[in-house]
Image: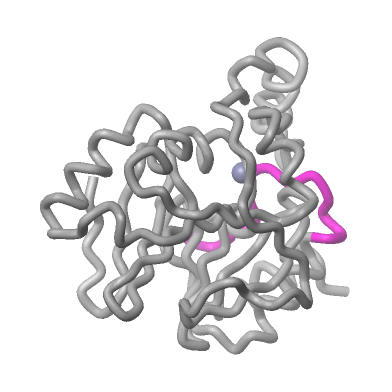
Amino acid sequence: METSSPQHDFLIFRSGMTHIYLLPHAGKYLLVDAGMKQHVKEFFSYLLKKNIEPSRITHVLLTHTHYDHTGALSHILELTHSKVLVHKDEADSLAKGYTPAPYGTRLSTKVISFLGRKIFPAYSKYDPVEADLLWEEGSSLPWDHPVRLIHTPGHTEGSISVIWRDRDAFVGDTLFGYEKDDCLPWFANDLNHLAQSWEKLLDTGCETFYPAHGRPVKRELLAHAYQRHFGS
Ligand SMILES: [Zn+2]
């Protein structure tokens, strides 16, 4: 499903419960996350409707490797032949096609996490992919897409956020946009790392943070949620 973003120069596609983002530059596109397997056909219809030849997607950046971000990846690669960039700490998971469900940060999602890890691990599987490009903080970027990357661990160890024009950030699951007065992700493996990553995001000066799930989060909400969960 398409989500409109009239005030922006990037495209948002809703792949089931996951938003994926297409960032244009000089006739080429950087795709942030691949989305869900069940919605890959819709994604290609969307490209057709937008007159975007799949081969113009030169790179896919994974904010992390959970199945709802990687499920459509192998299919997208077949049609686009793009290169895949992932944080080095999650390359092995991607190559295995399995990233365990993250831990819950509230009672209901702790139950979901337990079920995902112990009872239904197969639910977290996806088609394995060998990444072309491994990134870690400090490495230079192998493309001319005008983005900056920061390592924002917490939800997972290898989570990456993408900074676009020093104003917008695509943050994967480092924030959730489901609630009016909070943006703590419902799942996170390490809350201490998450707190540091939120500080990094606030330090970017970006005004709007685009999560993979839910609505965009304004800077004020992030600052408020930081105080609430991690302030002294
Ligand atoms: Zn995730």
* Residue displayed at 32% across by 34% down: 39
Question: Along the line of sight, which residue is nearer the eye, 145 or 126?
Answer: 145
Q: Quadrant of the N terminus?
A: top left
Question: Along the line of sight, which residue is nearer the eye, 182 or 116?
Answer: 116
Question: Along the line of sight, which residue is nearer the eye, 4 or 127?
Answer: 127
Residue 117 in picture, x, y percent from top left = 74, 21
What colouring style does the render use? one colour
- Vertical placement of 161 versus 99: above or below? below
Q: Name the quadrant containing residue 28.
A: bottom left
* Residue displayed at 73% across by 77% down: 200
* Residue displayed at 11% across by 52% down: 49
Residue 229 in picture, x, y percent from top left = 76, 62
Residue 60 in picture, x, y percent from top left = 48, 55
Q: Name the quadrant containing residue 181.
A: bottom right
- Vertical placement of 28 versus 154: above or below? below
Residue 116 in picture, x, y percent from top left = 68, 21
**Side of 159 relative to 28 (left or right):** right
Q: Which residues are magenta?
A: 180-193
Q: Name the quadrant containing residue 88.
A: bottom right
- Vertical placement of 213 versus 129: above or below? below
Work out which residue is located at the far top of the displayed protein and give it: 119
* Residue displayed at 42% across by 65% down: 30
**Side of 55 relative to 177 (left or right):** left
